Image (spheres, rainbow, N blue to C red):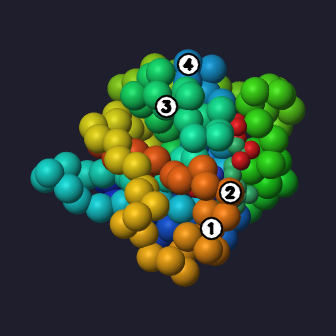
Amino acid sequence: MREKIETFSELDLTLEHLYNNGLLLSSGKQGNPMTIGWGTVGIIWHKQIFTIMVRPSRYSFKLLEELSEFVINVPTQELKKQVAYCGVKSGRDVNKIEKCNFHLEKSNNISVPYIKECPVHYECKIVNKNDIINSELDRDIIEKYYNEGDFHSVYFGEILGVYKKK
Ligand SMILES: Cc1cc2nc3c(=O)[nH]c(=O)nc-3n(C[C@H](O)[C@H](O)[C@H](O)COP(=O)(O)O)c2cc1C
């Protein structure tokens, strides 16, 4: 059972995971999990927004383009290995849900399921997408992160609800 919680009540924990091992982004109706290490949470358009950055080469990119929704799952420390795995393997090649022994649960507001083993999850609807544009970006950042191109797309997800294991 999960209860709906205040949107920002688990923000410290969320950002701590984002900074350390990563969060798990779920996309598509089968909830393919991908590790993310970059993102922001805040207010835009008077909405509570979770912003993520996904490179076009990811399988998750295709899934986000097809279905404008995503879930952000906040893992536990015990799931460190699974989080690392979802950051190197692609859903194109393996079923990461099965490999990680994750279980999916139906979300409350969107058709992307959440991961039962992660105690907190955010349900988000994409309200805007932008691309990181080479000519607009700091040269040092380009050298450090975009040697192979593959410039991120930035997805703005309106947070429709945040839920926590009871
Ligand atoms: C700690 C960590 C953080 C990552 N953060 C991102 C990210 O924010 N955006 C991104 O596009 N890829 C990121 N990646 C890489 C993807 O997780 C990785 O390429 C994954 O295999 C893609 O899965 P998919 O093809 O099933 O979408 C990260 C990887 C790790 C290990």
Report the residue marked by disc 4: 29
Q: Is residue 160 above or below residue 15?
A: above
Q: Mark 3 is on which residue type?
A: Leu
**Crowd band around label 2 with a 10 angstrom C-alpha radius: few (<14), some (14–19), many (20+):** few
Cα separation between marks 2 and 1 = 8 Å
Q: Which mark is residue 145?
A: 1
Using residue 110 as the reference point, say whether residue 45 is left or right of it.
Answer: left
Q: Looking at the rendering, which quadrant does residue 91 occupy?
A: top right
Looking at the rendered structure, the kind of residue marked 1 is Tyr
Identify residue for label 3.
64
Q: Earlier in the sequence, mark 3 or mark 1?
A: 3
- Seen in the image, is 138 located left or right of residue 35? left
* Residue depth check, mark 3 versus mark 1: number of the one nearer the observer: 1
Residue 81, horizontal then vertical, whole percent: 84, 54
Please name which of the two marks, 4 or 2, marks the residue nearer to the observer. Answer: 2
Relative horizontal placement of residue 121, taking residue 148 as reference (left or right): left
Q: From mark 1 to mark 4, how far is it between C-alphas? A: 30 Å
Point out residue 161 in the picture as x, y percentages from the top left corner. Answer: 34, 40
Give the residue number, with chain letter if any, for mark 2. 148
In the image, residue 68 above or below residue 160 = above
Q: Between disc 3 and disc 4, whose residue precedes? A: 4
- Mark 3 is surrounded, within 10 Å at the Cα level, by few (under 14), some (14 to 19) or many (20 or more) other residues, namely some
Identify the mark nearer the N-term, 1 or 4: 4
Foreground mark, 1 or 4, reads 1
